[in-house]
Image (spheres, rainbow, N blue to C red):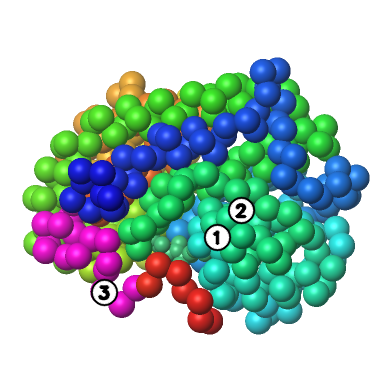
Amino acid sequence: EKGGYDYFMLKEIAEQPKAVADTLLGRIDASGLLTLDEVRIPASVLREVDKVVIVACGTAYHAGMIAKLAIEHWTRIPCETELASEFRYRDPILDQRTLVIAISQSGETMDTLMALRHAREQGARVLAVCNTNGSTIPRESDAVLYTHAGPEVAVASTKAFLTQLVACYLVALYLGQVRGTKWGDEIEAVIRELSDIAAAVDRVLETMEPVRALARSLADKDTVLFLGRHVGYPVALEGALKLKELAYMHAEGFAAGELKHGPIALIEEDLPVVVVVPSPRGRSVLHDKIVSNIQEIRARGARTIVIAEEGDEAVVPYADHLIRIPATPTLLQPLVATVPLQVFACELATARGNEVDQPRNLAKSVTVE
Ligand code: F6R
């Protein structure tokens, strides 16, 4: 049932191009319009929405952090993403014009369920993004957009994450479509690129051997740091989470701009630091700033592991290890940038003799608060 792979996690990493394609299937028509019939919240209601709140836990929360950037950029609706476990304990401001998006692979995460119940009590509409048909979270929501990742067996989430991103991009674009906001060239380009993104994920998977070798060479390290900005920041957090849960290593993700506000004190000789570099074409300011961050940490002895777009030559002089990913529109980059981090964590876990599919102390679905 592992389809020839040693672990479910490896199988699920390899299934990502298909999972992504399946989640897009039938949802963008030939003219580039989104057809999300499942989103049974009337267009008149969606047009009145004045705030989006995303609630989720763990990896799904990281997807939500990326979704926030896409929703705000493409629709101009203010959006916040919050850990479901924090949400209802702080008296959040919600009303009929709030759209709450609850992201959950299992559909059974108690923290997320309690957050959405609280939101509905306050009159907010809830849209679930979920991978499990008929599970509790979609049943208790106003509408659901299913991710089509197929069953995810390994405890560490991989293909579900990529499909959560795809579903969130679709929701963001759909909100833009319904509200007639910013429906210009950029959106059309994004929709086109989204339709080709499964092939890009596939290309990343074909180039993972050096990443595996690098992971094995780091098996005796204690700490790995991850840096990113903009959409690269949640990707850094996700890379660190995967490493904690699978390799049981101390791993932390930082927003690269925060380095000089504290974390740079952690940098020491030969400390592995993974840096997710934004596209030099999109927000080029961010790109240049992150290149100087790489220079700064390398000058202090860090071993830099740089994830950068094909053709980005500016990073080459400062990368001890360079991992190439295909060029994508800025907001879609997490779909390709996360994959090497999953492979990296999986290989490090194996090298350290850990049980990849069933990490210690963790359960696949967390049905207690
Ligand atoms: C990490 C992981 C967890 C889940 C989290 C939410 O690899 O799997 O962090 O993402 O427990 O689970 P769902 O998405 O089922 O609500």
Q: Residue furthest front?
A: 1
Ligand 1 near label 1 (Cβ, under 8 Å)? yes
* Label 3 SS: loop
Going by the numbered disc 2, the residue's amino acid type is Val
Which of the two discs, 3 and 1, labels the residue nearer the N terminus?
Answer: 1
Q: Residue at x 26, y 35 (%)?
A: 323
Q: Which mark is residue 129?
A: 2
Q: Residue furthest top?
A: 31
Task: Tell me residue 212's x, y (percent).
Answer: 16, 44
Q: Which residues are magenta?
A: 347-362
CB under 8 Å between discs 3 and 1: no
Task: Tell me residue 18's x, y (percent).
Answer: 42, 35
Instruction: Name the residue that disc number 3 marks.
Output: 360
Placement of 71 over or under 132, stated as above or below: above
Residue 355 sits inside the magenta stretch: yes
Q: Can you see residue 334?
A: yes
